[in-house]
Amino acid sequence: MYPPEFNYVKPNTLEEAIDALSNEGAVALAGGQSLIPLLKLRVVSPTVVVDINKLPFRYVKYGEEVEIGALVRHYELEESPCGLLSQTARNIGDVQIRSMGTVGGSLAYADPRGDWPTAMLAGGAVVKTAAGWREIEIDQLYRGPYVTSLNRGEIITSVKLRCPPKFSYVKFSLRRGDFPIASVAAAAWVKDNHFDYVRIAASGAAEMPVRLKKVEAILQGAPLNRDVFIEAAETAKKEAAPPHDFRTSAQYRKALIAVAVRRALEKL
């Protein structure tokens, strides 16, 4: 199917991009892995597509914190020394998607099954924006499926986080390279073989990626052993309130979340 007619602009500066995106009906184009299919299916009908690929947001800075520019492609993080970034990037889609898709685009699109939203939620990331000129904690970014707290014209410029010393990501998909029907990301700081600080995030456990706070409460201060992991998995199964859709049932998702939590903890 052909997309509807729209105007196309490719700003040279951030100011030009903000001005273009402030118009009603304007949408941003980064990697296009979500937008292009929606245009072809006519799910969206923008008045103008604003190609932001000339903006200077394709970089990764390592230090006490890691800062990832919004236009960094997934494949560029596959060999990152930060386990959260490398593990997540390698688990995304196929080669084409990893070559074109961007970190910022994935976060802004807010697909409830997205890999980056779940991983960044576990990592406690902070999103930096232009136009709004603010920093948004990842816990406050998502309002629902495909809905964020970003305002019209507000652009994600980068995302920053403290790279967790221990991280694991487990996902279950119907086909290799597909979106997960359930996934779990675990980020942990460990001291003397006990959880000093831990964040557990999941997709498929609710209408959007969420932290499993009851699971986190059980793990906080607990030793890393099989009994604790089993208890955490059972708690996750009770805490999860997954949707039922054509891909699978809510009951099956609950079972998958439990297994994913246990496996993610075992991989730490």
Image (cartoon, rainbow, N blue to C red):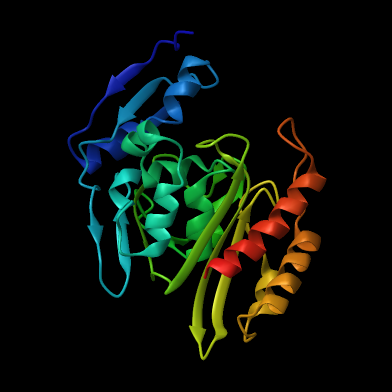
Name the one closer to the observer, 219 or 55: 219
- Residue at 40%, 28% in the rendered image: 26
In the image, is 214 to the left or to the right of 186? right
Asked whether residue 135 appears in the rendered view, the answer is no
Q: State the count of labels.
A: 0
Q: Residue, x 55% and y 61% (percent of image)?
A: 139
The residue closer to the viewer here, 71 or 79, is 79
Residue nearest the observer in this picture, 210 or 135: 210
Q: Is residue 13 left or right of residue 255?
A: left
Q: Is residue 7 left or right of residue 187?
A: left
Residue 100 position (above or below residue 47): below
Residue 264 in sight in this render = yes
Residue at (77%, 60%) from the top-left corner? 237
For this orientation, the residue located farthest to the bottom is 192
Question: Residue at coordinates 67% horizontally, 69% vertically from top-left?
Answer: 213
The spot of residue 43 in percent (x, y) is 55, 20
Q: Is residue 164 above or below residue 201?
A: below
Along the line of sight, the residue nearer the viewer: 62 or 25: 62
Q: Is residue 99 above or below residue 214?
A: above
146 relative to 209, above or below: above
Question: Percent position (x, y) of residue 72?
Answer: 29, 46
Residue 84 at x, y percent in the picture: 42, 61
